[in-house]
Amino acid sequence: MPFSDTIKKLVQNAWDDGYPCLLATASDAGPNISPKGSMMIFDDDHLAYWERSKKQALANLHQDPRVVMMYANMAAQRAGVVESGFLRFYGVAELHETGPIRDAIFARLNERESTHVGADTGIGVLIKITHAEDVRGKPIK
């Protein structure tokens, strides 16, 4: 599903713009929502992020790889940049502790993420997008 350059830029800059992406995961232990400062649209079919905290989101992914990533930015909606300020990306995560996909995700991190304490031991997470929609159910483009 191709995404516009606007959507790609909003997600890529979400943390720095003050609208961090939130990743929802679940397991037998319950649901979890975590901010992910390295979230990116990796390509037209995948999101990706760098897992360096290795806390509850990672534990949940080991049990259930299904996720929802939420991007919320009402200022962008009010400014007419996007039609809806709430975007949801549903998908299935794959963990990459080594290899070319891990390396490709790391190479696309911004400087803040790639030099942060613990970055060198992080895990690349690639999320196959199953569908993406705004809060009204309209597909994201």
Image (cartoon, rainbow, N blue to C red):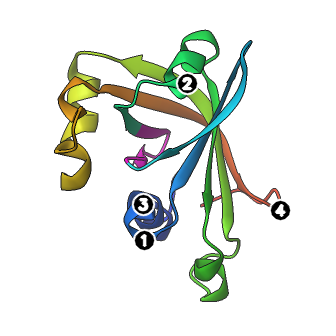
Q: Where is residue 46 in the image (x, y as percent from the top left)?
A: 47, 38
Q: What stretch is highlighted in magenta?
A: 38-48
Q: How many labels does the image show?
A: 4
Q: Mark 3 points at which residue?
A: 15
Asked which secondary structure carries label 3, the reply is helix
Q: Name the residue under label 4.
A: 136
Q: Where is residue 70 in the image (x, y as percent from the top left)?
A: 63, 51
> How dense is the environment of label 1, judged by Cα within 10 Å: few (below 14), some, or many (20 and up)?
few
| Disc 2 to disc 1, C-alpha distance | 25 Å
Asked which secondary structure carries label 2, the reply is helix
> How dense is the environment of label 4, judged by Cα within 10 Å: few (below 14), some, or many (20 and up)?
few
Q: Earlier in the sequence, mark 4 or mark 2?
A: 2
Residue visible at 58% across and 79% down in the picture? 76
Residue 12 is left or right of residue 119, and the answer is right
Pointer 1 and pointer 3: residues touching (CB < 8 Å)? yes
Q: Mark 2 points at which residue?
A: 56
> How dense is the environment of label 3, judged by Cα within 10 Å: few (below 14), some, or many (20 and up)?
some
Q: Mark 1 points at which residue?
A: 17
Q: Which of marks 3 and 4 is nearer the N terminus?
A: 3
Q: Which of marks 3 and 2 is nearer the N terminus?
A: 3
Circle nearer the viewer, 4 or 2: 2
Residue 8 is left or right of residue 129, and the answer is left
Residue 55 is left or right of residue 76, and the answer is left
Quadrant assignment for the C terminus: bottom right
Asked where in the image residue 59 lies, by quadrant, the reply is: top right
The extreme bottom residue here reads: 79
For residue 110, say whether it is visible.
no
Kind of residue at badge 2: Gln
Asked which secondary structure carries label 4, the reply is loop
| Disc 3 to disc 2, C-alpha distance | 20 Å
